[in-house]
Amino acid sequence: FMCLVCESTITATTSREHESSTMHIFHQKLQSGTSTAPKANLHLTETNAGYRILSKLGWTQDTGLGPSHKQGRLEPIKTVFKQDRTGLGAVKQVPRAAVASASSNDTEKFLTRKQLERLKERERRK
C-alpha cells in the first residue's frame, strides 16, 4: 500500500502496524508542524483492567500519563522479544566438544561432580 503521509510504498507491514510505527508518527509530526505527538492508533477496551484503573484516576485516552499537565507519553514503549533466554549479565557458555575416542581418565574431565561420584561408586562395587 502507499502511505500518503510518509510518501512511500509500504510492503513489510500492514497499514495498521505502519500507522503506529515511529517512521509514520515522525512524518505526521513533520507535516503538521506541531511538537505534540499525534494520537496513536492504539485502543484499550473498557474491559481492560489497566484502562479501568486509570479511568477511575481521571485519565482519558487523549491525554498522556505524568504529573506535568498530562503531557507524558501517549504511546507505549515498544518491546523486543528476547530470543536467547539467558538472564541479564549471563555469560554464554560454549558447549564442550565430544571426544570420539576417550579413555576413562578423559571422560572424567567432562562429568559433573555427581556423575563423577556415581562413576567412582560403580567402580568400587566391581
Image (tube, rainbow, N blue to C red):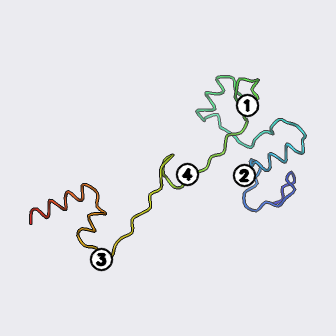
Please tell me in which quadrant of the rendered image residue 49 appears.
Answer: top right
Residue bearing the label numbered 2? 17
The structure residue drawn at horizontal position 74% and vertical position 47%, both measured from the top left corner, is: 20
Q: Is mark 2 on a helix, strand or loop?
A: helix
Task: Report crowding for label 4: few under 14, some 14 to 19, many 20 or more residues within 10 A (C-alpha).
Answer: few
Q: Residue furthest bottom?
A: 101
Give the position of the N terminus as an image quadrant: bottom right
Which x, y percent locates residue 10?
Answer: 79, 60
Precedes in sequence: disc 1 or disc 2: 2
Precedes in sequence: disc 2 or disc 4: 2
Q: What element carries label 3?
A: loop
Precedes in sequence: disc 1 or disc 4: 1
Which x, y percent locates residue 116?
Answer: 23, 59
Residue bearing the label numbered 3? 101
Q: Is mark 1 on a helix, strand or loop?
A: loop
Residue bearing the label numbered 1? 72
The structure residue drawn at horizontal position 10% and vertical position 62%, both measured from the top left corner, is: 124
Q: Which mark is residue 3?
A: none
Q: Are marks 3 and 4 in contact (CB under 8 Å)?
A: no
The structure residue drawn at horizontal position 71% and vertical position 23%, both measured from the top left corner, is: 67
Task: Measure the alpha-carbon separation of dots 3 and 2.
Answer: 55 Å
Task: Measure the alpha-carbon separation of dots 3 and 1.
Answer: 65 Å
Task: Measure the alpha-carbon separation of dots 1 and 2.
Answer: 22 Å
Give the position of the C terminus as an image quadrant: bottom left
Task: Measure the alpha-carbon separation of dots 2 and 4.
Answer: 21 Å
Residue bearing the label numbered 4? 82
Horizontal side, residue 62 vs residue 33: left or right: left
Q: Given the image, on which type of amino acid does mark 3 rest?
A: Ser
